[in-house]
């Protein structure tokens, strides 16, 4: 991956490709689940990849509740999976 | 100069923009995704530039979008990606949310081309990670070149799974098996409409080619499957179903598909008419006043038809006479009728076991809906206010259709008589801070 974009997930560094969204890059890197559901703590990950289902909500650069499937990876982006509630 | 705002940059929205610019209008286009293209041409620009292997594997139906995308990017319309419409009132004022926060816009005429989403197909375990829509997996392929973890099983039917399976094969991957629910159809079998066959001849031969290739690659095919269930702790691990005998299969990924339905939420919240079409088992939107509806939003039509309908919507919005696009659009409609008859939806929601989660946001299962329907009757608004179904972040996009199917079956009401539950703005998640940041 020559043109990799550096970003990190839970403090670990990864490379994304140009045009990749946070959701697609994380699926490629096998980083599921994305979160646990607030009602019953069931594990969740992207389902629709098009902004409809809101299953891919994740914290990006300190801002919670971002739709990972609509967000392109940019250099230095810091992603956190709210895995502990 | 008339100002036109277009919501959605799929084939319909892009064609509408190109046509409107031809007539000299000022055109502003918004789409919630990072790149123009909509569903069929998702991420086409970056795929063509950066992912040669994927680009050549996706085939001609994807490549065909290149000229349209290029014409759109050079037509002089202003395009804002990653910007969602969350409110539209009938005075033509739009409220939008984008990377820089919230903003408003006004227009002399508005074209809504919000396209389609996959019809949710709730089965037990469908909320687990590594369960996705087939169309979602195709977007993953287009944006990332990724074929998900194998073994991949597709549950469902329709043309999209066949196309996706063919694209995966060209990427060197493989769909391990197809589980076709009872009542659904994997093949093009119902040659019901001779005009449709003629109109869609090009598509049909392509459809058959996918099938031959698919069978040659020997995916397992299980027909008339019932009691479908996905099992796993932290992600999907097994797929269980019956076909006369019991099956329990180890899976890496489960992909669901039961056709596509119009993305009606913005149109419904704007108060446009939302009729139900039994032949497509879906709601669609109709134009009203200066708000014009185009593409799949007006009823699933496919990429060619969506582009034609976008062109016509722009002509209508600008008071121009319709070109010969209308005659071509009728041909696309005729073909679509054939496709609709060939691939009836499986409607698993109606027969979903009580434990199946229907509303993924508020966690409302099929059993709770059945009980509410029995006690309160078929009015979706009463069920909604009692169960909070459809009131989470997705605003009912993932459950409204299933709610209708379950309530229709449970109360013996025709789906036609069960309206869409009331939708109010904002139709997307928006914080109070973002609202406060809105400058009028
Ligand atoms: C997941 C999926 C995959 C598909 N893949 C194929 C395929 O490979 N081949 C094929 O022939 N057909 C495919 N289809 C069928 C497809 O519906 C049509 O072929 C065609 O894309 C329809 O064009 P359209 O312009 O009407 O809508 P779409 O292409 O659906 O485009 C609508 C656009 O509007 C945007 N939008 C929606 N709501 C908002 C909002 N509130 N604010 C801002 N923007 C918004 C969407 O993000 C999208 O970009 C697919 C359908 C789906 C749902
Ligand atoms: S995966 Fe559905 S909204 Fe992101």
Image (tube, helix red, strand yellow):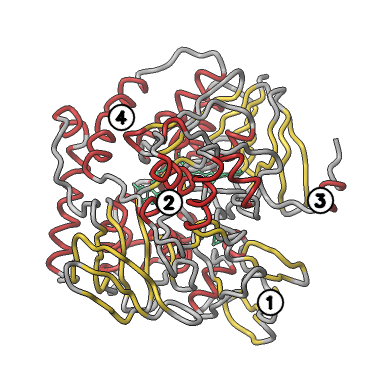
Q: Mark 2 vs mark 4: same chain?
A: yes
Residue B203: image location, x then y, percent: 22, 43
Q: Is mark 2 within 8 Å of ligand 1?
A: yes
Kindly indicate the quadrant of the structure image that contains residue B53.
Answer: bottom left
Residue indicated by mark 4: B333
- What residue lies at 43% left-to-right and 41% top-to-bottom? B411
Q: Of label 2 and label 4, which has the lower sequence position?
A: 2
Q: Of label 3 and label 2, which has the lower sequence position?
A: 2
Nearer to us: label 2 or label 4: 2
Q: Mark number for residue A82?
A: 1
Residue B223: image location, x then y, percent: 18, 62
- Element class at badge 2: strand
Residue indicated by mark 2: B118
Q: Mark 1 vs mark 2: same chain?
A: no
Chain under callout 4? B
Can I make out residue B69 in this image?
no
Nearer to us: label 4 or label 1: 1
- What residue lies at 26% left-to-right and 58% top-to-bottom? B181
């Amino acid at each position: 991956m020559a043109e990799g974009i550096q970003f990190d997930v839970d403090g670990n560094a990864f490379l994304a490709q140009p045009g990749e969204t946070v959701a697609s890059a994380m699926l490629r890197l096998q980083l599921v689940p994305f979160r646990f559901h607030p009602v019953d703590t069931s594990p969740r990950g992207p389902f629709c990849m098009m902004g409809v289902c809101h299953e891919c909500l994740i914290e990006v650069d300190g801002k919670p509740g971002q739709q990972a499937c609509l967000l392109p990876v940019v250099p230095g982006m810091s992603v956190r999976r709210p895995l502990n509630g | 100069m008339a100002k036109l705002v277009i919501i959605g940059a799929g084939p319909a929205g892009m064609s509408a923009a190109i046509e409107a610019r031809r007539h000299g209008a000022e055109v502003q286009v918004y789409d919630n995704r990072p790149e123009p293209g909509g569903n069929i041409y998702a991420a086409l620009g970056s795929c063509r530039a950066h992912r040669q292997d994927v680009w050549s594997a996706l085939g001609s139906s994807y490549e065909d979008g290149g000229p349209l995308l290029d014409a759109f990017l050079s037509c002089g319309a202003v395009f804002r990606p990653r910007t969602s419409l969350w409110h539209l009132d009938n005075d033509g004022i739009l409220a939008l949310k984008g990377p820089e926060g919230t903003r408003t816009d006004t227009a002399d005429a508005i074209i809504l081309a919000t396209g389609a989403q996959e019809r949710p197909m709730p089965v037990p375990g469908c909320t687990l990670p590594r369960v996705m829509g087939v169309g979602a997996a195709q977007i993953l392929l287009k944006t990332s070149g990724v074929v998900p973890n194998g073994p991949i099983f597709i549950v469902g039917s329709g043309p999209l799974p066949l196309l996706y399976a063919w694209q995966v094969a060209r990427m060197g991957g493989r769909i391990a098996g197809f589980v076709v629910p009872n009542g659904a159809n994997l093949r093009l079998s119902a040659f019901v409409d001779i005009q449709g066959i003629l109109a869609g001849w090009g598509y049909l031969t392509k459809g058959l080619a996918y099938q031959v290739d698919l069978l040659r690659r020997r995916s397992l095919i299980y027909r008339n499957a019932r009691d479908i269930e996905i099992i796993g702790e932290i992600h999907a691990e097994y797929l269980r179903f019956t076909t006369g005998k019991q099956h329990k299969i180890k899976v890496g990924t489960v992909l669901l598909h039961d056709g596509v339905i119009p993305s009606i939420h913005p149109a419904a919240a704007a108060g446009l008419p939302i009729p139900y079409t039994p032949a497509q088992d879906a709601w669609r939107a109709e134009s009203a006043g200066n708000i014009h509806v185009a593409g799949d939003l007006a009823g699933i039509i496919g990429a060619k038809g969506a582009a034609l309908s976008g062109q016509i919507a722009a002509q209508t919005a600008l008071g121009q006479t319709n070109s010969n696009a209308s005659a071509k659009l009728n041909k696309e409609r005729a073909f679509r009728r054939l496709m609709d008859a060939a691939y009836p939806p499986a409607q698993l929601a109606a027969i979903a076991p009580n434990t199946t989660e229907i509303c993924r946001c508020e966690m409302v299962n099929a059993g709770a809906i059945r009980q509410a329907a029995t006690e309160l009757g078929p009015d979706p608004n009463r069920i909604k206010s009692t169960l909070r179904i459809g009131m989470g972040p997705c605003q009912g996009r993932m459950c409204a259709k299933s709610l209708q199917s379950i309530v229709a079956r449970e109360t013996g009401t025709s789906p036609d008589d069960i309206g869409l539950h009331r939708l109010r703005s904002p139709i997307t998640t928006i914080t109070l801070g973002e609202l406060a940041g809105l400058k009028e």
